Amino acid sequence: MAKDTIESSAAVAPAVPEAAGVPVVRAEGIRKSFGDNVVLDDVDLTVDAGEVLVVIGPSGSGKSTLLRCINLLEPIDSGQIFFDGREITTRGVKVDQVRQQIGIVFQQFNLFPHLKVIDNLTLATRRVRKIPRAKAEPRAVELLRRVGLEEKAREYPHQLSGGQQQRVAIARALMMEPHVMLFDEVTSALDPELVGEVLIVMRDLARSGMTMIVVTHEMHFARDVGDHLIFIDEGRIVEQGKPAEVLDQPKQERTRRFLRRSLQLAESLEELTVQEVESDKEGGRE
Ligand SMILES: Nc1ncnc2c1ncn2[C@@H]1O[C@H](COP(=O)(O)OP(=O)(O)O)[C@@H](O)[C@H]1O
Ligand SMILES: [Mg+2]
């Protein structure tokens, strides 16, 4: 099975879950605390095959924890998470196998500094899936071409810009043929002029049919690429809907405040005062 998919290296799009109509990811009533700190409080979400779910929210609202729970990097306290129709938060689940099918890319690229780009891509497939180098490399080259970096295959991460490294990290995650890709603020650490090239790669991935959950502050991306948007604050989903609807006509005061602040910070500092920002923060804790 794996052999066939690797050989057909042009077919980069992920396998669609067997049962059509079954969401790729479904979470019900997720709760997660660190000590007394309730970080996720009764979170439900559904991501259908080929859909892009965008998650926005202030710093510390639980966005990264949500992705880490879906990826089984963090155990949840209660609730259920289903992946391709099967519950993955139950006993006896082979965590490593599930994780192989859930790609995740972080703000920090986490490439192996001592390995060439091509070896960063092929290492996991060679080690975990026991795919020989000669079979893994053509797929790696195909994926590098897809992210515009075929020519960098023999270079080391430090020879690349941040945007290029992040594109390598995306290609590396795709090597495992994930059924869903999770992105955690993958452009937040980049210089502004490098953000676009990473967003373009993510947009093209979405267009190719990849199912994605994207935590981002890039509102243009959310609007243009997202199918559904969730605004999360203090571990709760405050508001959700079509990205354009939530961004243009937020119903909740909390959402309006968050958007007003982030959009203003992006476009103009003129009308903002530090007092207003501080009172916004307090308002969010009422
Ligand atoms: N491993 C951890 N141990 C203890 N607290 C954590 C841990 N990870 C996150 N938190 C806390 O959980 C809350 C949400 O964090 P996080 O999910 O990183 O938010 P976001 O990604 O929205 O900024 C924060 O209060 C953070 O301090
Ligand atoms: Mg985070």
Image (cartoon, rainbow, N blue to C red):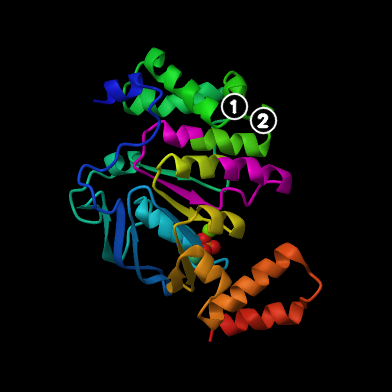
- Point 31% across, 26% down: residue: 129
Measured as percent of width and height from the top left, residue 40 is found at: 40, 69
In the figure, residue 3 lies in which quadrant? top left
Residue lying at the far right in this picture: please name it: 270
Magenta stretch bounds = 171-200
Residue lying at the far top in this picture: please name it: 134
**Does residue 235 show up?**
no
Compared with 100, 82 (above or below) is below
**Does residue 105 show up?**
yes
Measured as percent of width and height from the top left, residue 71 is found at: 37, 50
> Quick check: 68 left or right of 147?
left
In the figure, residue 257 lies in which quadrant? bottom right
Q: Residues within 10 Å of mark 2 (few under 14, many from 20)?
A: some
Label drawn at residue 60: none
Residue bearing mark 1 = 149
- Point 53% across, 76% down: residue: 250
Q: Amino acid at mark 2?
A: Leu
> Quick check: 6 left or right of 153?
left
Compared with 253, 104 (above or below) is above
Measured as percent of width and height from the top left, residue 45 is found at: 35, 63
Picture quarter with the N terminus: top left
Q: Amino acid at mark 1?
A: Leu
- Point 28% across, 25% down: residue: 2
> In what element is the residue under mark 1?
loop
**Magenta span has 52?**
no
> In what element is the residue under mark 2?
loop
Residue bearing mark 2 = 160
